[in-house]
Image: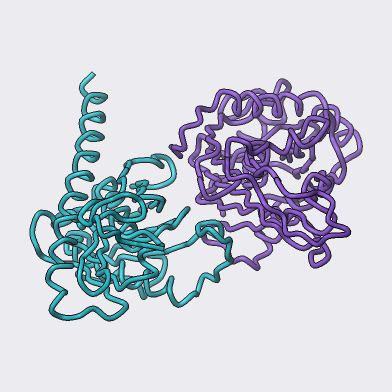
Amino acid sequence: MELYSPEGLRIDGRRWNELRRFECKINTHPHSADGSSYVEQGNTKIICMVRGPMEPAMKSQVNATSSTVEVNVSLANFSTFERKKRSKTDKRITELKTTLERTFNECIMGHLYPRTLISVTVQVLAQDGGLLAAMTNAVTLALIDAGIAMYDYVSGVNAGLYDQTSALLDLNTLEENDMCSLTIGVIGKSEKLALVVLEDKLPLDRLESVLAIAIAGSHRIRELMDMEVRKHGNMRLAKVSV
Amino acid sequence: MTLLSPAERSYLRDSLTASPIIRPDSRTPHQFRPIEAKTSFLSSSNGSARVRLIDGSECIVSVKAKVVDLASVSNLVEVDIDVDSFRDDSNFVTNLKFHILNSLANFPSTVLKLTTKYGYKLFIDVIVTSHSSYPLTLISLATYLALKTARLPKLVSEVNDEEIAEQPTFADDWAESTLIQDLLDAPFQPPVLITLGIIGNNIIFDPSIEEEQIIDNSLVIGFYNGRVITPINTISLSSISNGVNSIVLVKALELGNKYGGMVVKALDTLIEQDIDDENIF
C-alpha cells in the first residue's frame, strides 16, 4: 500500500499538511455532567465529561494549595475495527490517563480551586489514529464548558515522518502504524508545548519540520474549537437575553 | 444511598399508594420518562444506538457481527456491559448482563447462519455513561434500537458449502446490506425489558430514582411478540424488600400486556423518524 504517492497525495486523498475533518460540540450532556464535549477527528470519536470542581471522595486527593485533576479513560470494546475486550488496567490506558492528568494539572489554574477534585471521564467510541490528540481536544472543550479557569486552549494533533523525509500532518491508523509519529498539545496561539509524546524513533534533524507542521495544525484546531465555543456561547447568551 | 428525608419518604409513599396514583413528576402510572435517541452513528459497527433519559442517564449500544466457524462457538449472541464506576465482575453489572442475555434467549439465530459451516456472531456492547435509576430498561431500549437498525452485508458466495469448502465472501456495496428483519419472514422484534415498581397494591412503570427509594419491590418483565413473556423476575432496588402478592402479580401482567405494545410502537416510530446523518448528538 502506498501511503504517500509521488504526486503528494496520501491514501485518503489529503496533502501532507492537511488535517482530517474536525468536528466538535460542547455541552452535549447538560444534565449528567458539569461540562461535556464531543470530538470527531477523522473517524476518531470521543465523548468527554467533566465533573467538578468538587470535594474529593478520598483524603489522599486533597491538595491544600491546588485542585487535583483525575482522568478516567475508557476505550469501548467496539472502538477498533476488530472488536477487542480491554481490561481497565491496560498499560496503554494507564499511560494515556497519566499523560492527560499531567498536562491538564499544569494548564488549569489550580490555585483558584484548592482542596477540590476535577474528575474527567473520557469515553472513546471509535479510534482511527490521533487518539491522544483527540482526547486532549475533547478534555479542553469539556473543561471550558465546565467553566474551569485555564491559561489557554490546549489543542492537540499528531504528525509523522514518512520515509525519513516528508512530514505528514494528522495521521490515521494506517499511517500511524507504518511510520514514526509524535503527538503534541499546544497552548493557545503560542508555540509553547504542554504535551509531547514520541513513542518511536525520529531522526533529530527532521524533528523540527515535524514539530513545525504539528504546531501549525494545532493552531488550526484551536481556531475550530474556538469557533464552536463562541457559537455555543452566543447561543446561550441569546437565550438569557430573551 | 439515601436521597430522601423521612418526611419526604412518607409524603411520597402516601401519594404513590393513593388512588389515583400521584407520581412526583406528574406522570401517569404507565408512563415512561421522556427519552431521546439516535441510531446508526457508528460507521465501524453494524448497528448502534444511543438513548438518553431526561435525568441525564445515558446508554450507548453497539452491535458488531463477526464471521465465525459455527462448530467452534457455543452461542451466537454475546453481551458485554460496561457501567461507569462499576467493576466488570460486580454483582450489579453481572445481573444486568444476565437479564439482557436472558431476554435474548429466543433471538432468531437461524438468520445468523451464513452457510452450513460459517455464521455471524453478534457482539452487543453496552456502555452506560451515567445513570441514576436502575439502568436495565434503558439498556434494553437501546439494545432494541441497535438490533433493529443493525445491517448485515450481503453474502455473495455459495450458501451450500457441504461438499466444497469455501470461505464466505461479501458484496462490497454497503447499499446491498440488509436489516435482520429482511432476513426473517416474520417481523423482527427483540424483547424489551420493562421495570415495574410495586407499592402497596399499586404498580408504576419505569420508576425514577426517588420512587425507587420507597417502592416495596420491583418486577422486570419482558415484552415480546405482543405479550409479556417469562421469565418474570423481582429485583430489589432499595433497602426495603417485601414479597409480591399474587393479585399484584396478575395486575402487573395485565398492565404489561396492555401497555408494552405502546413502548415497542414508540421505539419503532423513533427509528422511522430518525434522520440518517451519522451524527451522534
Residue found at the far right of this picture: B246
Image quarter in which the C terminus of chain A is found: top left
B281 left or right of A214 in image: right
- Residue B214 can be seen, yes or no: no
Between A132 and A237, the one lying in front of the other is A132
Residue found at the far left of this picture: A190
Task: Say which residue appears at 36% left-offset and 55% top-offset.
Answer: A11
Which colour is chain B painted?
purple
Q: Which chain is cyan?
A: A
Using the rendered view, name the quadrant where residue B257 is placed. Answer: top right
Image quarter in which the N terminus of chain A is found: bottom left
A203 left or right of B40 in image: left
Using the rendered view, name the quadrant where residue A179 is placed. Answer: bottom left
Task: Say which residue appears at 68% left-offset and 50% top-offset.
Answer: B237
Name the spot of residue A66 as percent of width and height, x first: 21, 67
Between A186 and B72, the one lying in front of the other is B72
Between B69 and A45, the one lying in front of the other is B69
Using the rendered view, name the quadrant where residue B153 is placed. Answer: top right
Looking at the image, what colour scheme do you see?
Answer: by chain
Establish if A89 lies above or below A114: below
A138 left or right of B239 in image: left
Between B192 and A79, the one lying in front of the other is A79
B275 left or right of A204 in image: right
Name the spot of residue B219 as percent of width and height, x first: 78, 42
Name the spot of residue B203 as percent of width and height, x first: 76, 32
Establish if A70 lies above or below B179: below
- Residue B61 can be seen, yes or no: yes
Task: Say which residue appears at 83% left-offset and 60% top-offset.
Answer: B164
Task: Say which residue appears at 80% left-offset and 35% top-offset.
Answer: B184
Count of marks, rendered view:
0
